[in-house]
Image: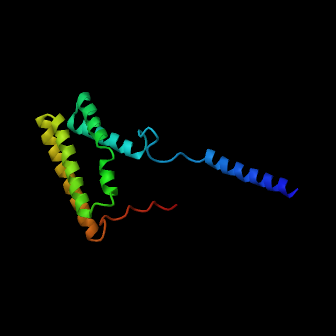
């Protein structure tokens, strides 16, 4: 009798576990095809912004996607490399950035290259301000006003 109860209990626990697995939310991040998740969405938004800002042709957009796809994961590999020092990682990431920038410039017209350089300079200034604010004690912008109470 005890064996039957033990088997029934085991079956119930296994059923609960299986049910939890079946009803679990899908994992966040890329799927087995590597084509879904937040990083892909971020890359697509970046490409769409560049397309709008630089008035890229469909051919340029396709080439831009190829550039980003060919370097997908390179930065992450460098960041996660436990053998490299912090300085070596910084240098390799800078080299990767320059390589990608050179490839991007290679598909742009001279006018687009100038505009792209201007956009990157503006972004660099914004990041410098953010780092400066962080070092000075965080964001100095006031919090949003509280909603009116009723």
Please provide percent x and percent y for residue 1: 88, 56
Please provide percent x and percent y for residue 36: 43, 40
**In the picture, residue 137 is in which quadrant?**
bottom left
Please provide percent x and percent y for residue 89: 26, 58
For this view, does 19 lie left or right of residue 31?
right
For this view, does 19 lie left or right of residue 55?
right
User: Residue at (38%, 46%) from the top-left corner?
Assistant: 39
Closest to the observer, 65 or 47: 65
For this view, does 66 lie left or right of residue 111?
right
User: Residue at (23%, 39%) from the top-left corner?
Assistant: 53
Outermost bottom residue: 137
Closest to the observer, 106 or 90: 90
Outermost right residue: 1
User: Residue at (31%, 39%) from the top-left corner?
Assistant: 69
**In the picture, residue 35 is in which quadrant?**
top left
Q: How many marks?
A: 0
Closest to the observer, 113 or 15: 15
């Amino acid at each position: 009798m005890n064996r039957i109860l033990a088997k029934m209990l085991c079956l119930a626990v296994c059923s609960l576990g299986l049910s939890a697995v079946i009803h679990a939310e899908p994992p966040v991040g890329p799927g087995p095809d590597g084509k879904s998740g937040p990083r892909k969405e971020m890359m697509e938004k970046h490409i769409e912004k560049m397309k709008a800002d630089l008035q890229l042709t469909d051919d340029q957009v396709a080439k831009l996607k190829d550039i980003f796809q060919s370097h997908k994961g390179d930065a992450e590999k460098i960041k996660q490399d436990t053998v490299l020092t912090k300085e070596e990682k910084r240098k390799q990431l800078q080299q990767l950035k320059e390589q990608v920038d050179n490839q991007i410039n290679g598909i742009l017209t001279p006018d687009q290259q100038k505009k792209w350089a201007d956009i990157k300079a503006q972004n660099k200034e914004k990041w410098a301000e953010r780092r400066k604010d962080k070092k000075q004690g965080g964001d100095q912008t006031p919090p949003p006003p509280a909603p009116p109470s009723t």
